[in-house]
Image (cartoon, rainbow, N blue to C red):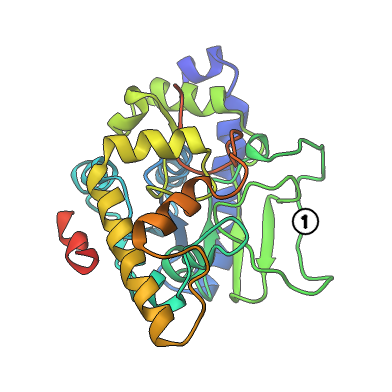
Amino acid sequence: MEQLYLFGIEKKVQAAVELLKMCEGAALAMDPAGYYLAFSGGKDSLVIYHLAKMASVRFEAHYHLTTVDPPELVSFIRRKYPDVIIDRPPITMWNLIVKKQLPPYRNARYCCSVLKETGGEGRFVITGVRWQESRKREKRGTVEVLGSRKPDLILNNDNEESRRLIENCQMKGKRLLNPIISWTENEVWLFIHSMGIPYCELYDCGFRRLGCIGCPLASVKSREWEFKRYPKFQEAYIHTFDRMVAARRAAGKSDGNWSSGEAVFQWWMYGNPKQEKQVEGQLELDNDDGWFKEAG
């Protein structure tokens, strides 16, 4: 802890550990397995995982496979964090797109609720949400229990400025604990390096955040780079869009400008004004192949 103290984050570490200990009783009352730790393999989830270890609290770490995960990320989790439970989705992204008959986009992110937000019901969930990641920065109270208004759907990795240290998600029947909500990105990395915590190699390849390949919340520049790095995923999306177009025709829906999978892909990438600004919490640049069977 001496090095942590020298960097000035000892108090935040201690506060997070004490918070985890304080709320463990509530977590155990909700489920004998304790906390449900939302583990993405990204830097913030590494911190909350190791804080939970330091607090010696009971928890289960879960990673939700989306089928559009960076291969290096999945490999990293399996190698370095074998105790993390990898949950497979009820449907792949490829079949989900065909079922929905439209691609996921910024205003219709059905993929998140189906592929990423199905876990933790009835549990006390630990997340790595941080205020600094929000689009607006505004000082708010450190503790708030939501529920005085109509319940909203809260995404575990949503970093809006309204997020609180402790939250209730009535629609999902779960509570959310955000122990590093006040941490900065620098403090996250200081903790990781000070503790000698292994992290995904993609961070050393220029990525600042990790997430689904092709996520429409990412900037155009980031998505172009992703598909250059992972051309098989671009091929999989185009083939899936071909199947989607066929499904729309079979259902009697208008094609519009979606004459082929390639046309859909071009619209999906460039049809709207280019989004040069990254949306927080998504795969972003600093500068299992089996999933492709359903796409191919």
Label 1 sits on a secondary structure element that is loop
Q: For the point 45% across and 40% down, which residue is it?
A: 283
Q: Residue 272: image x %, image y %? A: 60, 48
Give the percent coordinates (x, y) of residue 5. 55, 17
How many labels were placed on the picture? 1
Q: Quadrant of the C terminus?
A: bottom left
Residue designated by label 1: 144
Is residue 81 visible from the viewing direction of this image?
Answer: no
| Residue 56: percent from left, percent from top | 42, 48
With 120 as the anchor, is 273 left or right in this view?
right
State the residue in front, 105 or 153: 105
- Closest to the observer: 277 or 274? 274
- In the rendered image, the residue lying farthest to the bottom is 251
Q: Residue at x 56, y 27 (%)?
A: 185
Q: Position of residue 117 (x, y in %)?
A: 49, 66
Check disc 1: other Cα within 10 Å, few if <14, some if 14-19, many if 20+.
some
Q: Quadrant of residue 204?
A: top left
Report if residue 280 is visible in the image: yes
Tell me the residue at 31%/65% (across/down).
240
State which quadrant residue 145 falls in: bottom right
296 displayed left or right of 55 = left
Q: Establish if 20 lies above or below 16.
A: below
Q: Is residue 11 above or below residue 154?
A: above
Amino acid on which the number 1 mark rests in the picture: Glu
Q: Quadrant of residue 70?
A: top left
